[in-house]
Amino acid sequence: MTTNILRPSRAIQTGQIAAGVTISLVIIAAATAVAHLPWGWAKPITHFVASYPLLNAFVSAFLVANFIAIQCLGFIWLERKFAGWMQARLGPMHVGWKGSLQTVADAVKLLLKEDIVPTDADRPLFALAPYLIFLPCLLTMMVLPFTSAWVGYDYPLGALFVLSISATTILGVFAAGWGSNNKYSLLGGVRAIAQLLSYDIPLILVVLSVVMLSNTMSLTQIVIKQSTQWNIVSHPFLMIPAFLIFLVCTLAEVNRTPFDLPEAESELVSGFHTEYSGMRFAFFFLAEFANNVFSAGFAVTMFFGGWLGAGLPAALWFALKTLAVIFLMMWVRWTLPRLRIDQMMSFCWKALVPAGLILICATAISSVMR
């Protein structure tokens, strides 16, 4: 007995690819034009804002927060389309052109949904958890250099700041799991904390290896030191394994397949945020995609020369490199099956941690011998 599988026609698939290429070219052209506009009129405003530290911090945080929200809307739609392409289907098509407004419609729906709080929940923890998870995204984005000028705060210890702030996400996860007063949420929170703490160790070892090669913790300076060659090109035997370890750890940190055990629907309903609805749930979802974008940008900064490139504006180079890493993450997500919890933890402690220790020792020897 044969089953007819409905697949998009070749003409529709070609149209989807043509539409994607057209949108990409339009965005590149628009970004190039914006970069060459005369921005001198804005200098009095920027000087005024910079003269007041509190106002400067508020404006920077406001711009970064809105940037996170807007880019997440775009990347959610992009991932849905990419998943459709990987699985021989169309993805969102009905709301807006080619489904481009589907994510906006979902955001409006979440805004209008009832905010439900379980009767026996620990209300302070329950209310605080989404913000404890979203706030580290905002703080890490503040130090990510899109260009030498486009950075919220050029902190000299940027790499250390990113590692320390991103580790505080476990507080929000624990607050959500415990505050929900739900055994599935608590189990999901415990599994998430174990996963995050475990994969933090090889991730820290990889970042320290890059710091040792660059001899600085400033993210801006790490990029500037790659002006002649990217780290992954200048030290391929060290940095290619470092990038692969970084990629695996990043997928685990942002709960993406094959490491999405904290939110395994088939086992835990929806993990540590089972009891959340409306905009409280949206904050978890927003933080996940924002962390995905930040992790890709952080990888570009560490290994691929950040904003450096010829012929295009610096910010556009950074965006294109980041987009390439995001596509790689999407490819992995929609290709590999989910691991079991024991496989995931064994892989970290038996493979990634020893590999990270070997990598940092080899990097130290290479740095001394230079």
Image: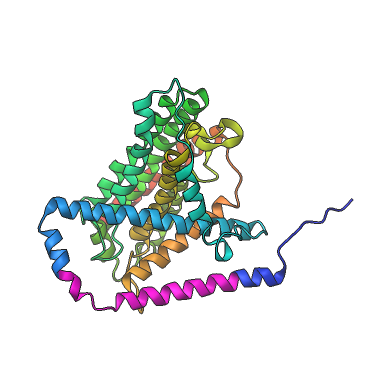
Is 27 on the left-hand or right-hand side of 152?
A: right
Residue interval drawn in magenta = 17-43
Q: Quadrant of residue 230?
A: bottom left
Vertical position of residue 136 compared to residue 212: above or below? above
Instruction: Give the side of residue 1 with respect to residue 54, left or right.
Output: right
Can residue 212 be seen here?
no
Q: Is residue 343 left or right of residue 229?
A: right
The furthest residue to the top? 120
Seen at 15% across and 59% down, the residue is 49
User: Is residue 23 inside the magenta stretch?
Assistant: yes
Name the image quarter holding residue 352: top left
Q: Is residue 74 magenta?
A: no
Number of marks drawn: 0
Residue 301 picture location, percent across and down: 33, 59
**Where is residue 6 shown, x and y percent of the image?**
76, 58
* Residue 370 versus residue 174 in the image, above or below: below
Residue 174 visible in this rendered orientation of the protein: yes
**How far across and how far down the image is residue 29, in percent?**
41, 77
